[in-house]
Image (cartoon, grey):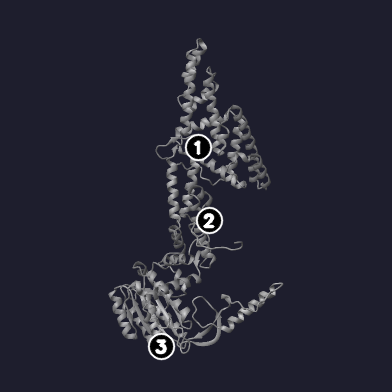
Amino acid sequence: MHGRFRYTPWHGGPDPLAPPFDVRSALDEIGQDVLAGGSLRESLRELLRRGMDGRRGLDDLAERVRRLREAARRRGDLGGTLDQVGAMLDQALAEERDTLAGEPGDDARLAEMDLATIPDDVAGAVRALGDYEWHSPEARATYQQIQQMLQREVVGAQFEGLKQALSGNDAQSREAMQAVKDMLADLNQLLAAHARGEDTEDQFREFMDKHGDLFPERPENVDELIDALARRQAAAERLMASLSPEQRDQLSRLMSEAMGSDPDLASQMAQLSDNLRALRPGLDRRSPVQQGQGGEPMGYGDAVGAVAELADLEQLGEQLGQGYFGATLDDVDVERLEQYLGADAARDMEALRQLERELERQGYVSRGDDGLRLTPRAVRRLGETALKRVFERVDAAGRGDHDDRAAGQADELTGLSRQWEFGDELPIDTVRTVSNALQRTARAARTRESAHSTGAVELLVEDFEVAETERRSVAAVALCVDMSFSMLQEGRWGPMKQTALALSHLVQTRFRHDALQIIGFNLAARRLTPTELTEAEPEWVQGTNLQHALMLAARHLRRHPDAEPVVLVVTDGEPTAHLEADGRPTFHWPATQTTIRATVAQVDELRRSGAQLNVFMLGEDPGLARFVDAVARRAGGRVFTPDVSRLGEYVVADYLRTRRGRR
């Protein structure tokens, strides 16, 4: 069995070698939104929010983050440290009073009087007992535990994982605290050097070699270390902002009292705080955290960790929402997303990123100063898709010569050839194809030191060429499309664009010698390329200037005097605008006789040039119906009243029917 392999279909879930998304299908989905009037950026964002191909989109990920955030808010009482200190203080005072009650003498009575005068608030009581001479060894030990616990909480809040290291017996705690002080001194030196712009790579490695055991998150560089520490510091300050004024005051005094018992530790912690503020000034340190109801009281360190987690989830929610200016998928912290939602969510996020990158890499979108734009390749793809949908509904008998593969009278060889493209039905130029393969093989042999030739010629896709043909009958076609705002309001904007793209793709791929010009018109008319039409967004302007559109159509026909002239008009309203003598457009509603006469004059000019004028009337505007009927009789054209969903079918079928009549 050595060297033999057996291949079977993949059954382990999603194919690991399959692309994360069908990019062409994704482009079609985006294109539908763009053609309906949306911008490319908005359409792409909407696709990313929905997801596709069974993968979660941004909305699903953001909802999961929101649920985690709500659960974190209900986890516990952020002011639990005060309750814990209060309970320990009550225990120490009870033990001390029991001892004093059993002792005779004035000293015991004076001590009882001192205890009776301590403040009622926890922070004040702890401070007042700082100089008290304890009579009970148990009470003294309990009070000392309060001081040690507060120090552990302060240090543990800043350094995740150190709280446990400081929880041993007295000797172990003193040793661990000294290690923390040494680490703080080295850390502040490192951060100060980094702030001065010095190269701290070697210093960072030495720091981690010496103190790495105190950082379970194992940062890989100085910036990651600073990010982790600044995140915890900001969470601690947001925690204080979330407490009531009374709780905030008492907890601040408790922390100051605890740190005041160790001036060296207090100095290093204060220096660290200043360094982190200077290195990461933009972090949110003031916003209070909304707390839910219920939950067990949490210590200060645990509460800081909970607030840091909430801050992470809030930031992830903003990143996934993509609602801020300049937002991109690269803003999303995938590592943090995986930490909270798991590896599947991270894979879905990477797939969304890859979709955006693939659209750009494969040439469907380009990024410029004005944002993302569809490329001509993408527009051709949209036109191809639109044309396929049209022909799915056109009867085979009405397809004209779209499927005609004959040469002879329909196609005449020009003597030229070009590279084969997917979908070409032109005859293969055998001589040029084999010649290309031979030349490629010879070039490859020259680049190798020792070429082994078997005499066979291998044909590759890029070798194939097809013979260009020329149709004997050509047409100059002007497609005039109404781009007034009513087209968007009545849901006709998208079908209008798809129809124009389908016809453009048909001409480009099957009738290359026909000259198609797309003309859009509202208050004024303008010539449009397929790409410009695709990117055109609705304009809030009034006016249907058919006169100007027909004027541009006539100019297009005059540029092709040997072609058969055809003018197709798609509109949903009677003319309400025309050009004045000075070239400025003017709008009047209802339509005036001046506008009607100017438009009819342009119709007469087209009739004199022999052009066929066909109108595709959308909607049920009585004024438009009367006008187009009169125009059809005057110009000898036809009027169609298609349902908007079948507009493309009507326009393309009419174009093919006209070509078949010419042949």
Residue wearing tag 1? 302
Is the residue 646 above or below the residue 44 in the image? below
Residue wearing tag 3? 662
Distance from Cα at disc 1 to Cα at disc 3 = 84 Å
Mark 2 residue type: Asp
Mark 3 residue type: Arg
Identified at 63% across, 34% down, the residue is 179
Query: Could you tell me which quadrant the C terminus lies in?
Result: bottom left
Residue 593 visible at all: yes
Is the residue 352 above or below the residue 89 in the image? below
Q: Residue 142, image x and y in percent?
A: 52, 24
Residue 566 quadrant: bottom left
Is the residue 525 above or below the residue 221 in the image? below
Distance from Cα at disc 3 to Cα at disc 2 = 56 Å
Asked whether 228 or 579 is in front, the reply is 228
Instruction: For mark 2, give the secondary structure.
Output: helix
Q: Residue 346, image x and y in percent?
A: 50, 53
Asked whether 291 or 272 is in front, the reply is 291
Q: Residue 404, image x and y in percent?
A: 44, 83
Query: Could you tell me which quadrant the N terminus lies in?
Result: bottom right
Instruction: For mark 3, give the secondary structure.
Output: helix
Residue 154 quadrant: top right
Residue wearing tag 2? 330
